[in-house]
Image: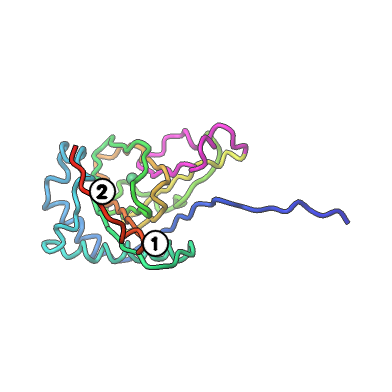
Amino acid sequence: MEAAWDHKLYFPTRVVTKHSGDEVMVEGLREMFRAEKKYSSKYFEKIADLEDMMDHSNQYPVLTKLKEFMWDGMLSWLKAEGIQGEFGVQTHVFPNYGKKGAYVPAHNHQAQVSGVYYVDIPDVNEKQDLFVQEDTKRYWALDPGVLILHDPRGNASLAELSEKNYVKFFPRPGMGIIFPSYLWHSVTPHQSEKDRISIAFNFTIISKEERGMAVEPLKL
Ligand SMILES: [Fe+2]
């Protein structure tokens, strides 16, 4: 009998999600955004990722609770990837506050594992599937306020016959999503009068060996 072609599937990209199911935590975070007016200011949009929200965790203990939830997601991601060893982790937490029409262009993050927690999502349709991966036509269709994960295989969108070179994620308040930081992603504009609020996480994970490497100061 003629042998079949031997198939392998290399370079898949792990994306994990979980609903925190903790209404008290979500409400606590909303309360923080209502109190901290700077987060919703036009100016803050441009410097959001220079902020580390964990600096305010004494004032808002709900942030510590949120970090624990996202940390757990990060662990789940690392374990499933078979990562083992001793590491040091730097966690950077910053807000994304989107008013009507706001969008986030495609970008990635300088870290190893990244995540987003959704505090407020306007006009959620509970019947909508969480993830949509259809054809190219659906890629270009304007779905408001969705997170688009772009195919990390360079230029796959030009040549991938399956047309499966993106995933649209329709977030719900209270949900967290974790993915590798190199994964390019964008957020489409939402057209609701209500604000779209999420909190981004960057986990920079350094191996024990790397941690021991000397750092020389450099001022330019
Ligand atoms: Fe991002």
- x and y percent of residue 98 in the render? 25, 41
Residue 71 numbered tag? none
Residue 107 is inside the magenta segment: no
Displayed quadrant of residue 71? bottom left
In-image side of 65 versus 10 (left or right): left
Q: Quadrant of the N terminus?
A: bottom right
- Residue type at mark 2 is Ile
Magenta residues?
139-161
Q: Which residue is drawn at 21% across and 60% down?
A: 27
Q: Which residue is drawn at 27% across and 55% down?
A: 214
The 10 Å Cα crowd at callout 1, few under 14, some 14 to 19, many 20 or more, is some
Q: Quadrant of the C terminus?
A: top left
- Residue type at mark 1 is Lys
Residue 197 numbered tag? 2
Mark 1 vs 2, N-terminal side: 1
Q: Find ligand 1 in the image and state its quadrant.
A: top left
Residue 18 numbered tag? 1
Using the image as rendered, state which of residue 197 and residue 80 is in the foreground: 80
Q: Is mark 2 on a helix, strand or loop?
A: strand
